[in-house]
Amino acid sequence: MLPDLLVRLVADPFAVLNAVGLVAFALVGATKAIREEFDLFGVTVVGLGTAFAGGATRDILVGRVPLALQSFGEISLGLLGVALAIALSVTFDDADEHPVTVASDAAGLAAFATAGAIVATDVGVSGFGVVAIAVINACGGGAFADILLDRSPFILVEDFYASCTVLGGLTYWLVDVGAFAGVVGSAPGTAAACCAAVTIGARFVGVYFGWHLPTAQSLAVHTSRGER
């Protein structure tokens, strides 16, 4: 099973991105569960849920059996991410805020947004569909993990996070079939590279500058101040 997975990683850009996303998001999700003092089973469940929920939703939307149910190779990558999270938590204090975890989160976000855009384009959905599936693939697992952790999905209440995948998915569509198709380059991986670069770049910039989308309350405060 694992040799077959290695062959796919070499031949298929989607497989590479999917593998990166699975390991990275399993690590991030498991780290969150460790912070909440879940037992090892709970840590594994949250880690695998973070890694696979978005992709499973993507596959259901495009009418195919989720990849996690087709091969043990994908599950093994998720378990690798969980193991790395446990090792990180044993080695460092505040592992969920460690640069390795932050970088893994950004890498997983970019990888899954791009993987979702590839799948959506392959099945011929609209530009909106490409962006929507990119966002679902990238953010669905984190939202699922937050529900398991008994809190509101953070992508809905804070941080400049899901917006990065919107930008990435839109970039993929523009480069692959939209206004910039054929302008940036016609190589098969060009759209994927642009999507991943925009997503991870936007995420790192957002973290560095502490960007957050405004809330309705903050808009109301600014409006009231302007009327004075």
Image (cartoon, rainbow, N blue to C red):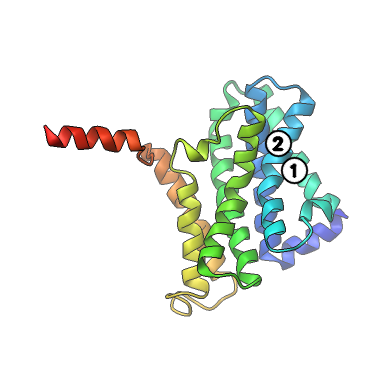
Q: Is residue 53 above or below residue 152?
A: below
Left-right relation of 136 to 7: left
Quarter occupied by the N terminus = bottom right
Q: Secondary structure at mark 1?
A: helix
Residue 37 in the image: state x and y as whole percent: 68, 19
Question: Considering only vertical position in the picture, is 188 above or below 55?
Answer: below
Provide the residue designation for mark 2.
Answer: 47
N-terminal-most mark, 2 or 1: 2
Which residue is under mark 1? 78
Q: How many marks?
A: 2
* Along the line of sight, the residue nearer the viewer: 154 or 9: 154
Mark 1: which amino acid? Gly
Q: Circle 1: is it few (<14), some (14-19), or many (20+) Cα within 10 Å?
A: many
Q: Residue 50: horizontal and vertical position, in percent?
A: 67, 40
Q: Amino acid at mark 2?
A: Gly
Residue placed at 51% from the left, 40% from the top?
155
Q: Is residue 24 above or below residue 96?
A: below
Q: Which mark is residue 114?
A: none
Marks 2 & 1, CB-CB < 8 Å contact: yes
Q: Is residue 26 left or right of residue 93?
A: right
Q: CA distance from mark 2 to mark 1?
A: 7 Å
Residue found at the far left of this picture: 228
Q: Quadrant of residue 34?
A: top right
Q: Residues within 10 Å of mark 2 (few under 14, many from 20)?
A: many
Query: As rendered, which of 20 and 117 lies closer to the eye?
Result: 117
Residue 127 vs residue 181, the one in the foreground = 127
Quarter holding residue 2: bottom right
Q: Horizontally, is 222 left or right of 227 in the view?
A: right
